[in-house]
């Protein structure tokens, strides 16, 4: 079922890209200098599988082509109030977004190809430093969960 509305769907993914050494990729938003984050993005259609949304957003925002097998569904969600600066992107009356968390472990840090329309810079940081730099509290919490989630996955 295509999403024909001009508004964003208030359901998104957050993909924490990291290495086994817990280096985390952060990207800086083009529309808000100093706002660093992991890969994020909304579903394109109401029936787009979340895994597909996550893989698409990683490719669009970083140029990294990941496979479904590389992507970890952390089976965690955050519901948060949409920042007033971005509410105009959603249908009238929509004030909250549901965010689904995913992880993507790469063997080592790598160069990324940013979408200049969305992001202006990237950096790899140790996970604690990355968490401190995230502008979104839910993004920072997801980054800080990495050691615990990795133990659970292994």
Image (cartoon, helix red, strand yellow):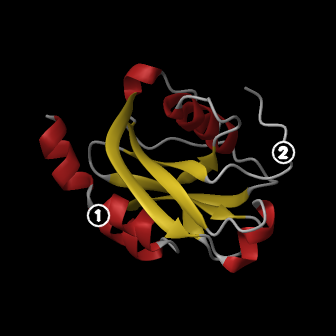
Looking at the image, residue 128 lies above or below residue 117? below
Mark number displayed over residue 144: 1
User: Quadrant of the rendered structure where residue 119 is?
Assistant: bottom right
Q: Which is nearer the eye, 142 or 87?
A: 87
User: Quadrant of the rendered structure where residue 87 is?
Assistant: bottom right
Whether residue 66 is visible, yes or no, is yes
Residue 14: x and y in percent read: 49, 51
Determine the secondary structure under disc 2.
Answer: loop
- Left or right of residue 136: residue 43: right
Quadrant of image for the C terminus: top left
What's the residue at 63%, 42% (across, down)? 62
Mark 1–mark 2 distance (CA, rounded to whole Å): 35 Å
What's the residue at 31%, 69% (across, down)? 128
Quadrant of image for the N terminus: top right
Residue 97: x and y in percent read: 56, 60
Residue 64: x and y in percent read: 58, 33
- Left or right of residue 66: residue 8: right
What's the residue at 45%, 48% (across, down)? 100
Sequence-wise, the earlier of marks 1 and 2 is 2
What's the residue at 70%, 37% (across, down)? 44
Residue 80: x and y in percent read: 50, 68
**Disc 2 target residue:** 5
Q: Which is nearer the eye, 80 or 137?
A: 80
- Left or right of residue 22: residue 12: right
């Amino acid at each position: 079922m295509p999403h024909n509305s001009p508004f964003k769907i208030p359901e998104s993914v957050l993909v924490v890209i990291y290495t086994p050494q817990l280096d985390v990729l952060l990207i800086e938003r083009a529309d808000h200098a100093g706002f660093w984050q992991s890969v994020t993005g909304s579903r394109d259609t109401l029936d787009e599988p979340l895994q597909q949304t996550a893989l698409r957003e990683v490719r669009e925002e970083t140029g990294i082509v990941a496979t479904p097998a590389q992507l970890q569904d952390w089976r965690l969600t955050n519901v948060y109030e949409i920042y007033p600066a971005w509410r105009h992107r959603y249908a009238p009356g929509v004030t909250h977004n549901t965010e689904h968390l995913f992880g993507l472990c790469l063997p080592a840090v790598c160069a990324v190809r940013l979408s200049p329309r969305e992001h202006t810079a990237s950096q790899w940081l140790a996970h604690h430093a990355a968490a401190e730099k995230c502008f979104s509290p839910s993004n920072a919490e997801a980054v800080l969960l990495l050691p615990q989630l990795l133990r659970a996955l292994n």
